[in-house]
């Protein structure tokens, strides 16, 4: 029997990418390797993972140092890949392809071409201190050459959405195959309606949870629950925004225990990221019969149906637009959308994904 391993850059957060990797090993019964497995991410053993887990480096949180250290580790600490017949690369770890056997099948699941190199390069550059800008430009130049060479060595490139597929074509001039990440419909169920709206996006600039919090500060009669991870980068800023607001509650869930209960009992969820490549959050919400307040941007246009499975707001996501959408999407309106939400989520089922990923990897 052929041996398969999934190599992911880090298990640092409790995000959509990490949930996707968990769905992959369930479908393929594959080993997993990662830069490291953080205590702030999912505990795979508690998720019933029983295959081999390999860390190629040690845990580190300082962003740019982490990136450089892991780049080195993927280049020089992944000789174990020679043991495998199928290797699936996820996110920024494909430099490890040098350590695969020549007869191995190499598959790259591209969540997006690295945005600090391509479409968001200037935005990242602005955040770099003036004295470090020349070094940043050199690193990006070198990493761009390495990345494009590594991508071209792959036997197949998969991606998560038509939105990302277009980005890959634009920047890399290669074809890719869309394989939508799945949701385990057995886990996400409609359980009822409590009195809260839910946000469970990572607390980072791109997810704009700060705007959701600002909106609920203007609606003290409406309750917001924010689920976050211990390593989320914007955590303290958003905590400070909500200080003394009794209608805004923050929850961290060790081991992810209780997460599906929070989704299943919400009125609706709110998800307003900037040009999202793919986010599992809205599909998980719909699987539980919960409509989504969403933005007309990125992959969301492929998943949510305005007026049927959610309420659309402008891509700019102004605070007043969020307020207006919440007032429209009251408990009665959300309940009317339940069946459409559940039907739409079935297009992203684990069964569909299981069949397709096994066909790709094992044939």
Image: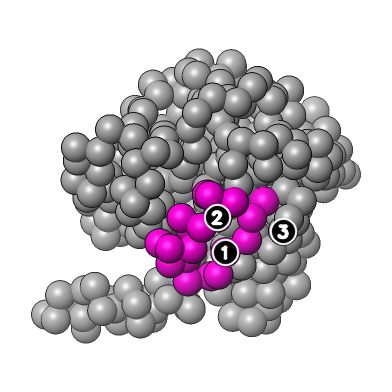
In depth, the one of 49 and 317 nearer the eye is: 317
- Give coordinates of residue 147: x percent, y percent: 51, 69
Label 2: which residue? 325
Give the SS element for disc 2. Answer: helix
Q: Is residue 107 above or below residue 197?
A: below
Do tag 2 and tag 1 residues touch (Cβ < 8 Å)? yes
Residue 10 sits in which quadrant?
top left
Residue at image point 76% right, 51% down: 308
Q: Quadrant of the N terminus?
A: top right
Q: Magenta residues?
A: 310-328
- Give coordinates of residue 109: x percent, y percent: 64, 54
Q: In the visual, does 234 lie left or right of 354?
A: left
* Spatial separation of the CA atoms under disc 3 and disc 2: 12 Å
Q: Does the rendering let one see residue 57?
A: no
Residue at image point 27% right, 47% down: 238
For marks 3 and 2 on the same chain, the one whose residue lies earlier in the sequence: 3
* Spatial separation of the CA atoms under disc 2 and disc 1: 7 Å
Residue at image point 15% right, 75% down: 129
Q: Is residue 271 above or below residue 42?
A: below
Mark 2 neighbour class, 10 Å CA radius: few under 14, some 14 to 19, many 20 or more: some
Of tags 3 and 2, the one toward the viewer is: 2
Label 3: which residue? 306
The disc label shown at residue 313, or none: 1
Mark 1 neighbour class, 10 Å CA radius: few under 14, some 14 to 19, many 20 or more: some
Q: Is residue 164 above or below residue 238?
A: below
- Give coordinates of residue 245: x percent, y percent: 25, 38
Q: Does the segment drawn in magenta span residue 322? A: yes
Q: In the visual, does 136 lie left or right of 24?
A: left
Q: Does the rendering let one see residue 245?
A: yes
Do tag 1 and tag 3 residues touch (Cβ < 8 Å)? no
């Amino acid at each position: 029997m052929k041996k398969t391993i999934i190599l992911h850059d880090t298990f640092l957060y409790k995000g959509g990418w990490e949930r996707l990797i968990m769905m992959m090993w369930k479908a393929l019964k594959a080993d997993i390797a990662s830069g490291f497995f953080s205590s702030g991410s999912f505990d795979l053993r508690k998720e019933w993972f029983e295959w081999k887990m390999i860390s190629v480096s040690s845990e580190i949180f300082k962003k740019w140092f982490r990136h450089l250290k892991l780049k080195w580790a993927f280049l020089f600490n992944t000789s174990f890949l020679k043991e495998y017949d199928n290797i699936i690369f996820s996110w920024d770890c494909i430099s490890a392809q040098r350590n695969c056997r020549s007869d191995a099948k190499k598959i790259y699941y591209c969540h997006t071409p690295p945005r600090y190199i391509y479409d968001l390069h200037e935005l990242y550059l602005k955040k770099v201190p003036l004295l470090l800008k020349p070094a940043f430009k050199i690193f990006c130049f070198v990493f761009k050459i390495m990345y494009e060479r590594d991508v071209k060595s792959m036997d197949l490139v998969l991606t998560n959405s038509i939105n990302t597929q277009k980005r890959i074509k634009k920047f890399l001039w290669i074809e890719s195959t869309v394989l939508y990440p799945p949701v385990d419909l057995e886990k996400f169920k409609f359980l009822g309606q409590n009195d809260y709206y839910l946000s469970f996006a990572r607390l980072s600039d791109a997810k704009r949870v700060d705007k959701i919090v600002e909106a609920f500060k203007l609606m003290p009669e409406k309750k917001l629950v924010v689920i976050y991870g211990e390593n989320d980068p914007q955590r303290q800023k958003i905590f400070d925004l909500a200080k003394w607001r009794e209608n805004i509650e923050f929850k961290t869930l060790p081991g992810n225990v209780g997460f599906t209960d929070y989704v299943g009992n919400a009125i609706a969820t709110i998800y307003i990221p900037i040009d999202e490549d793919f986010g599992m959050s809205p599909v998980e919400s719909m699987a539980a019969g919960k409509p989504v307040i969403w933005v007309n941007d990125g992959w969301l246009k492929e998943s949510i149906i305005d007026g049927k499975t959610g309420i659309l707001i402008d891509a700019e996501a102004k605070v007043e637009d969020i307020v207006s959408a919440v007032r429209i999407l009251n408990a009665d309106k959300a309940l009317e959308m339940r069946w459409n939400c559940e039907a739409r989520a079935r297009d992203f089922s684990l069964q569909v994904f299981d069949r397709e990923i096994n066909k790709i990897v094992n044939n």
